[in-house]
Amino acid sequence: MSKLPDPPCCVISDTFLGWTNGSCRALGMPRLVFHGMGVFAMAVKKSLSIHQNPNKCLTKSSSDTEHVHITGLMQLRFPLTTADLPDSLRQMDSCLSEFFVEAEKSDLGSWGVIVNSFIELEKDHVAPLECLYGNESTRAWCIGPLFLYDDQMEGGGNYYEEIDSFLKLHEQEEKSVIYVAFGSQADLSDTQLDELAYSLEQSGENYIWVVRSKTWDPPIIGRGLITKEWVELGHRAIGGFLSHYGWNSVLESLSMGVPILAWPMQNEQHLNAKFLVKEVKPALGVPAVGRNWKVVRREVICEAVKELMGGRRGKKAREKAIELGKLAKESSPGWWVFLQVLG
């Protein structure tokens, strides 16, 4: 390595490639770990994995409402329960749980952590995350939102003709459309899709809804547009986002000043929702959504949509989202600061 004319100054590797940590130590090279989650969710997962092995602090009889104490985190403004934890920390004595716990432990002692987030959003949890790595010099670098480095994301986007026509129809009535999308992995049953369709119509709000199902037929289409194509959240007509709360979706929505209606489904999405709804508050939650929900009724969804788009709490969430959007754009040079430190 030392004989190379231009040797690398560091290694940035995924959290699941823990073996790179030992290799970098042997070579005397800084190793930085990258994880797709935000600071808060990362801190919860790492704390449970290294301080309170979830197989010991949770049992098969643990209920979804049982409170979970997270060692090393600052005093939270809200309680965390077992229902908020990712499946990898809930499936007791499983190979999946063991794999994730070992992956978290293999990161210990890393020189640094790269996080796709911005400091103004999660600043209270950065220092606790750094301390969990067991190395006084470990630093967490919030260099996001990464998608803002793509200049194309700043515009209105290039849409299919149908989507473009719908947005132009409503752009004079600014913030009048709710965008509905659940990412590329989560699936809703046909029954749930029916309930959601009726709820959107009954809400009286204009909507664009991305549906991935190849078998479901919409029962009604009136005020909205159902499509299979993604829509960027920066368009002036978009005033709210009903989301599964994946971290990339959260960052895009907040960066564009769009408040979110949280419908978490898997992975760390419940942690993201709890953090944003209860602490930062640019978001509202869909009531009755939890680990054991089967079908959320149309009346529940309808009221949540109406509150986000025109209610008192929705207005406050929008104001907070707009504030965070400005901060997100101002934070985007964080990547260059990080490179200068590496020098």
Image (spheres, grey):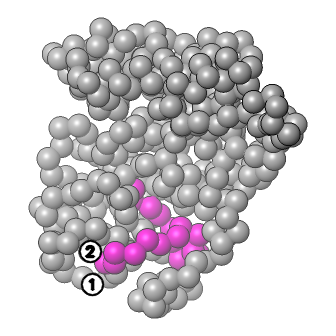
Q: Is residue 322 visible?
A: no
Decide: is 212 above or below 321: below
Identify the residue under disc 1: 222
Q: Amino acid at mark 1?
A: Gly
Q: Choose top left, top right, bottom left or bottom right for residue 334.
A: top right
Is the C terminus in the top left, top right, bottom left or bottom right quadrant? top right
Q: Give the x, y percent position of residue 196.
A: 23, 64
The secondary element bearing badge 2 is classed as helix
Is residue 92 a member of the stretch shown in magenta?
no
In percent of width and height, residue 138 lies at 70, 20
Residue 335 visible from this viewpoint: yes
Q: Is residue 67 left or right of residue 288?
A: right
Q: Name the outermost residue toward the front.
A: 3
Disc 2 marks which amino acid? Glu
Looking at the rendered structure, the secondary structure element under dot 1 is loop
Q: Are marks 2 and 1 in contact (CB under 8 Å)?
A: yes
Left or right, residue 129 beside residue 335: left
Residue displayed at 38% across by 26% down: 100
- Report the magenta residues as a range: 226-243
Mark 2 to mark 1 CA distance (whole Å): 7 Å
Where residue 14 appears, as percent x and y from the top left, is 54, 37
